[in-house]
Image (tube, grey):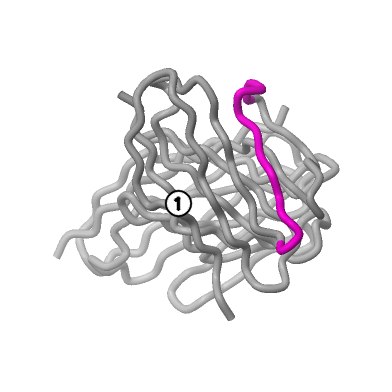
Amino acid sequence: ETGVTQSPTHLIKTRGQQVTLRCSSQSGHNTVSWYQQALGQGPQFIFQYYREEENGRGNFPPRFSGLQFPNYSSELNVNALELDDSALYLCASSPLGGNGETQYFGPGTRLLVL
Amino acid sequence: KQEVTQIPAALSVPEGENLVLNCSFTDSAIYNLQWFRQDPGKGLTSLLLIQSSQREQTSGRLNASLDKSSGRSTLYIAASQPGDSATYLCAVNGPGGYNKLIFGAGTRLAVHP
């Protein structure tokens, strides 16, 4: 069984640019959540996708957007990058989209905005 | 609004000590609580998941308890080892209508030989 994978592992961008991060969910999982973890802090929920629809969003501006594809993989897009967007971005998948399910995390993408 | 707090923020102990990490949350209407381990620059490894109807879970040298009514959880690590050095994160699921985790800032643990 393949776990959650993310690409790229590291990324350097400049302020104002756009970035796309990718996540492949664990086999059989149809729900993907994205989290942002700034240095020294706990992860913060960005949004969740269930069967290709956004199914909840945290306190992040609209320049953070996402997609989920029919194979349940997902993308996180961030437009007009700001220095504060520098963080570890974590993707997590869960099986059925129900409340209280265990989430399985990928290794993360480290984004540095200069 | 659910808030999660972890105490202490950092802990340094000699090898072999038993230790307790604390987590508190403000809204008791949770589905479950999960403890994670995070090594520097890495993703999250799930250690223990406690459903809201449960009081504790054990895995090897780890034991996590949950007192939902008081909004508290503890992670007990027995006979600590240098390999236990990492950041330990507590996360609650709920309240809310979808599967969202709310994390504490973590406890950074260093176990020295």
- Image quadrant where residue A27 sits: bottom right
Number of callouts in the render?
A: 1
Query: Percent x, y for residue B96?
Result: 81, 40
Left or right? Give the position of A106 relative to B99.
left
Q: Is residue B80 magenta?
A: no
Query: Percent x, y for residue A106?
Result: 51, 59
Q: Label 1 is placed on what type of residue?
A: Gly
Left or right? Give the position of A84 relative to A49.
left
- Closer to the camera in the image, A1 or B106: A1
Label 1, secondary structure: give it: loop
The quadrant of the picture occupied by the N terminus of chain B is: top right
- Image quadrant where residue B57 sits: bottom right
- Circle 1 residues within 10 Å: few <14, some 14–19, many ≥20: many
- Image quadrant where residue A13 sits: top left
Task: Identify the residue shown where x is 41% and y is 65%.
Answer: B77
Q: Is residue A98 above or below residue B7?
A: below
Query: Percent x, y for residue A102?
Result: 68, 62
Task: Identify the residue shown where x is 63% and y is 25%.
Answer: A60
Query: Percent x, y for residue A69?
Result: 72, 54
The quadrant of the picture occupied by the C terminus of chain B is: bottom left
Task: Identify the residue shown where x is 65% and y is 54%.
Answer: B33
Q: Is residue A69 magenta?
A: yes
Q: Which residues are magenta?
A: A60-71
Residue to which mark 1 is pinned: A108
Residue sitting at the far left: B113
Left or right? Give the position of A69 relative to A43.
right
Which subunit holds the residue at mark 1?
Answer: A
- Closer to the camera in the image, B99 or B47: B99
Q: Is residue A90 above or below residue A105?
A: above
Task: Identify the residue shown where x is 75% and y is 66%.
Answer: A95
